[in-house]
């Protein structure tokens, strides 16, 4: 199990088993009148077959294949991806509590400062300008309903 | 035929009378400008921009919203090529090929000619393809009226097979993505029996996983994640943009390429599953194969810019045909337009032309106007777009993230959709790492629910006989083509293997 395709194949195989298992709760119907479980079950079976084929193919493959090791240790900036995703999740988590304007300000400042660090002056200037801009466009111009914080905006 | 042509001209007249209303002209202009802008910005494509503006179209007329959203679509094709040529970064996927020769032309001081031919080529292709659309649509509508569930089912199968057949990487992986997409399409309440499928009892999932959430995640979020992982260096060439009008020599070289690109693009655009991205690659490959100097491709050959640019614009127009006549969206952009129509309670399909002629023809003719606007606007505005690109990426990407977040939140005003989008963003990012393409997945999600309905109806019609798909002439032919394409690579591989052994 050193090749990337073997791992993705295994994941897909597990997923397909879960899809089939989930479809067992649904009425299958008959071939003359297929029920809601008909298509999901067959999709699960087909997906399972294809993931097995993928695992088999990559196991038998002699020529150079992509290794899982290369994928994980390649010169990626994992820290950036992880940070960016955390900031995105925090946005979703705190949006309703903090309200739109404050959340946007923090979100922009966080991304400017931590992903590809900018000087604080740039961070503050762009975060403020962005917040005001977004607030004007979405709240006033498009008049969308955006969550308000405990302080009324 | 004579009556048909007369009829078409009458309809075009009707169309122009709708499209030339001041409000609709404004929507066309707005769409074209917004589209060019998102086309220029890397990481924000027409899909994300259209998803973002979809909720805002509640308030405007159905024609207006269609005109604006379509403007974004073809405007982005123009904008994408600008960045490909000037900075070697394709603003969106259909312009990837344009980088090859366009950027090289710019490096040799011919940025003006490259931008010029791409704009004129796009305009010519867009206009010719629109003429095709205008005359083909009524004929196809007649044919479509005879289609039943088996024809619809096999046609959608063909669409998915074509897309996987034309994908760059492994066909097996593309098919896996398509099956996964079909499964995601089954999530939610079953439209026939009302049973809940894979909803975890979450009310947000009852109506299925939203297309916009998936598209913004897989194209918006995943794209930015891939970008910030490396460092994007934007080096705008400091060349003066002189001579935007191609010379006589340039025209001589490119006119054939433009016409061929238009043909290829239009044809691939009509096929469900085809589209702008594939057609730009295909037309470049064909130009190279039939060129007198294939070795020079990639060093700044003007045909290498003209052909794919013409093809992606022609495909963008051609793709409207299955959506308007059959109600089958052949790509994600068409699915979003379909959604825009549904918001206003209009169901696209063979009856659209008959029931809403003003909308149908107004929309089509607005694209003539939009194309002209783009030609006039785009060339003088290029310096402005270049300024846009000078905003450093570390400043730009948080804004693109924010657009996605706000856009997805405003669909249903729920944070759940944001989580869903981030989840699909991670899925898109990881699947790219493992060389799985997002396009078959998305198309399958779009077509999934329609396909399932058509499959179940067909089986009820035939009392469980699968032969219904082969016995009916049209669906039989379509299915045979799909099966052929599906197994063709396997046969080819087997032959190669056999030859190796015998040699």
Image: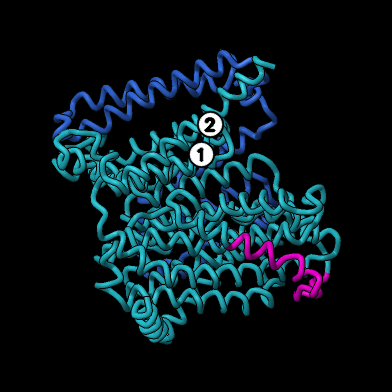
Chain colours: A blue, B cyan
Q: Are marks 2 and 1 on the same chain?
A: yes
The residue depicted at 29 percent of the width and 48 percent of the height is B151
Q: In the rendered view, tell whether residue B252 sits above or below residue B326.
A: below
Residue located beneath label 1 in the image: B165
- Near mark 2 (Cα within 10 A), the count class, few <14, some 14-19 or many ≥20, is few
* Residue interval drawn in magenta: B240-262
Tag 1, which chain? Answer: B
The secondary structure type at the circle numbered 1 is: helix
- Near mark 1 (Cα within 10 A), the count class, few <14, some 14-19 or many ≥20, is many
**Quarter of image, res B375:** bottom right
Residue located beneath label 2 in the image: B489
Nearest to the observer: residue A92 or residue B346 = B346
**Quarter of image, res B56:** bottom left
The secondary structure type at the circle numbered 2 is: helix
The residue depicted at 35 percent of the width and 69 percent of the height is B138
Nearest to the observer: residue B60 or residue B262 = B262
Can residue B396 be spotted in the picture?
no
In this picture, residue B5 sits left or right of residue A65: left
Tag on residue B244?
Answer: none
Circles 2 and 1, Cβ within 8 Å, touching? The answer is yes
Nearest to the observer: residue B324 or residue B422 = B324
x and y, in percent, of residue B68 in the image: 44, 71
């Amino acid at each position: 199990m050193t090749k990337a395709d073997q791992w993705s194949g295994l994941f897909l195989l597990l997923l397909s088993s879960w899809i089939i298992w989930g479809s067992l709760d649904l009425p299958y119907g008959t071939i003359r009148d297929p029920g809601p479980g008909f298509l999901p079950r067959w999709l699960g079976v087909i997906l399972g077959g294809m993931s097995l084929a993928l695992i088999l193919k990559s196991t038998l493959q002699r020529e150079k294949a992509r290794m899982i090791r290369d994928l994980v240790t390649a010169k990626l900036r994992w820290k950036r991806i992880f940070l960016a995703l955390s900031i995105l999740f925090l946005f979703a988590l705190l949006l309703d509590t903090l309200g739109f304007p404050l959340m946007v300000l923090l979100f922009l400042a966080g991304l400017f400062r931590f992903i590809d660090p900018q000087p604080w002056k740039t961070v503050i200037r762009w975060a403020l300008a962005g917040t005001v801009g977004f607030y004007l466009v979405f709240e006033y111009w498009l008049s969308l309903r955006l969550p308000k914080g405990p302080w009324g905006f | 035929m004579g009556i048909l042509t007369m009829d078409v001209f009458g309809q075009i007249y009707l169309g122009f009378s709708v499209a030339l209303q001041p409000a609709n002209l404004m929507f066309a202009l707005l769409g074209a400008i917004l589209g060019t802008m998102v086309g220029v910005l890397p990481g924000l494509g027409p899909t994300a921009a259209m998803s973002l503006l979809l909720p805002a179209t509640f308030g405007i007329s159905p024609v207006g919203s269609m005109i604006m959203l379509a403007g974004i679509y073809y405007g982005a094709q123009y904008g994408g090529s600008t960045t490909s040529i000037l900075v070697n970064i394709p603003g969106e996927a259909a312009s990837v090929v344009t980088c090859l020769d366009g950027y090289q032309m710019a490096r040799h001081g011919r940025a003006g000619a490259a931008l010029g031919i791409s704009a004129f080529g796009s305009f010519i292709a867009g206009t010719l393809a629109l003429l095709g659309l205008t005359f083909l649509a009524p004929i196809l509508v007649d044919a479509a009226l005879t289609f039943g569930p088996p024809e619809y089912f096999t046609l959608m199968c063909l669409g998915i097979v074509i897309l996987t057949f034309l994908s760059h990487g492994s066909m097996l992986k593309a098919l896996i993505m398509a099956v996964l997409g079909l499964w995601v399409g089954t999530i939610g309440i079953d439209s026939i029996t009302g049973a809940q499928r894979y909803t975890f009892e979450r009310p947000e999932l009852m109506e299925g996983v939203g297309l916009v959430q998936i598209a913004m995640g897989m194209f918006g979020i995943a794209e930015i994640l891939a970008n910030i992982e490396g460092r994007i260096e934007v080096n705008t060439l400091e060349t003066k943009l002189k001579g935007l009008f191609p010379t006589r020599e340039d025209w001589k070289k490119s006119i054939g390429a433009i016409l061929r690109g238009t043909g290829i693009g239009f044809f691939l655009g009509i096929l469900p599953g085809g589209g702008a991205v594939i057609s730009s690659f295909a037309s470049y490959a064909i130009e190279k194969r039939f060129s007198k100097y294939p070795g020079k491709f990639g060093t700044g050959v003007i045909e290498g810019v003209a052909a794919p640019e013409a093809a992606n614009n022609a495909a963008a127009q051609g793709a409207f045909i299955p959506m308007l006549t059959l109600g089958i969206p052949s790509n994600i952009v068409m699915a979003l337009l379909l959604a825009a129509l549904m918001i206003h309670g209009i169901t696209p399909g063979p009856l659209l032309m008959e029931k809403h002629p003003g909308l149908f023809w107004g929309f089509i003719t607005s694209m003539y106007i939009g194309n002209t606007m783009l030609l006039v606007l785009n060339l003088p505005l290029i310096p402005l777009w270049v300024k846009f690109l000078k905003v450093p990426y570390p400043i730009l990407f948080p804004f693109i993230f924010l657009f996605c977040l706000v856009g997805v939140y405003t669909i249903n005003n729920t944070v759940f959709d944001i989580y869903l989008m981030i989840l699909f963003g991670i899925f898109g990012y990881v699947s790219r790492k493992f060389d799985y393409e997002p396009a078959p997945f998305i198309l399958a999600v779009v077509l999934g629910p329609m396909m399932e309905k058509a499959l179940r109806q067909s089986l009820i019609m035939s009392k469980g006989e699968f032969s219904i798909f082969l016995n009916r002439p049209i669906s039989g032919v379509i299915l045979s083509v799909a099966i052929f394409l599906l197994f063709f690579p396997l046969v080819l591989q087997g032959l190669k293997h056999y030859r190796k052994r015998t040699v």
